[in-house]
Image (cartoon, rainbow, N blue to C red):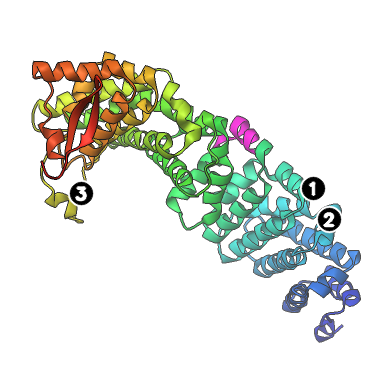
Amino acid sequence: MKQENMAATTEPNDISVSVARILNEKYCPEHLEVLKRFTSALRDQQYRDAVDREAFLTILKVLSRLSDKLQADRDLKSDALQLQLAAECFRALRNSCVQSARNQNLLRELGFVHVSIQLLRFLHVKSGDGIFESLRCGTQFLGNLSVGNQMCKEDIWRMSFPDLLLQLLKVDDEKTVSYASMVLHTCLDESKVEELAQQNIQLALRVVDLCQSQPELDWTVLIATQHFLKSSALVENMYSAMLPSERLTLLELISAQLNGGESPDCGIPPGVARFLASSFQKGCGAVLSLATGSASSNEVLQEALTVISLLDLLCEMTSHHGQFMFLQDHPDLLVTTVELLKQVHTIGKSGKNIFSPAQNFDSLLDVQADPSPVVSFKAHLIRLVANMCYSHGNNQNKVRELEGIPLILDNCRIDSNNPFISQWSILAIRNLFDHNPKNQELLASLERRGDADYSALRDLGFRVEERDGALLLRPTPKDL
């Protein structure tokens, strides 16, 4: 038979006849043209809806035969055409699934998920343009097959989780990784995220790693923010298994989610907030190594930066998100914060070091200067104290008992290493005095003994005013 007579028409009833001939002949370039015409025809919705079961069954036989032949030649030295044919089969299948639940269900029933995954398992360990083309198209097909179809999602997850999905996310080809991320995102739901947390943390770690190394892959960021961060168990397990540098990426994702929308519910569960608070308490001492010079290794530096990021998150959570104000009652978080503030403040006054106050405001305008890792750290400690004491009598009292009020008063000074520290200190003082007579009495006694220096407050335009036996923080009138 002459090959030119094999030209496939675009009639649904004829395509299975044209493709079936491939099964009985030696592979040739004309076979590829037949499949390409089928792929092109499937872009039309009307054509997709009319393709019969027999046509798909023929494609299944072709793909199965190609899979067997490719796996028989482990080196793939002379299989360029077979790889192209396999890629084109996947393209046709990918197109057939677009907005067609009928075709998705039919392909699933015929067994395409199993055959496709078996071929992808073999191909992912190979390399070369032909291999990547087949990997991309095969992974795209699984993605389109799963969109909006729960049964297909379940089959793909069952056959590919966890090893194949992890392997595809590690392929040295960005497009394949992107399509694999799409498959993972489409298949995930709450139960599967919990399965990840319990059974295969490596897959989750790979996703977070891709968020850092390939931020242009939107799918991985969506996976992390829309699925991973909603599971306290997964966040805790990932964090515990990560290196400090990897933890920073995870914390950046949490920060982005926290600040990413106008909805009061940011999607981060209370358990994650509690875990972050506990992690800050457990590791906060690492930041002190920046002053002593013991942060000689990059890992120690990363640990200190992690503490700084945790503090920033806790400040944000207790500032604008009412659902996290239960952190005011988190065991010993306030105590840890005040004690760390004492240590940082003492170290800064003991000699010139990274925590010492400065008046070098030109450095803040120098975009080429390397910023200190602890810029604003002390200010944020005071900010967290202020937030923890807002309308919370027990915490107000605890700061007084810890001798934190004179400490905060001592920081009502402009410091270029801590922009806005004076403003946060004033907010903390306001929150500490609010409806708390004992704290007001303490301030009055400090003034009488000369232990309270109000000059810094006056320089900032505030004065302490006694009214009806209570001390209030008021703006200084302009005419004074």
Which callout, 1 or 3, points at the residue further toward the start of the chain? Answer: 1
Q: Splitting the image into 4 quarters, where does residue 248 fall?
A: top left
How far across and how far down the image is residue 27, in percent?
A: 76, 72
Q: Find out whether residue 133 is within the magenta segment.
A: no
Q: Residues at badges 2 and 1 in contact (C-beta under 8 Å)? A: yes
How many other residues sit within 10 Å of disc 2, few (<14), some (14-19) or many (≥20)? some
Q: Name the residue under label 1.
A: 151
How far across and how far down the image is residue 13, in percent?
A: 91, 75
Q: Is residue 25 left or right of residue 418?
A: right
Identify the disc placed on residue 105.
2
- Residue at 46% x, 30% y is 325
Q: What type of secondary structure mainly makes up the magenta span?
A: helix
Which sits in the foreground, 40 or 230? Answer: 230
Q: What residue type is labelled 2?
A: Asn
Range of magenta residues: 193-202
Identify the disc placed on residue 370.
3
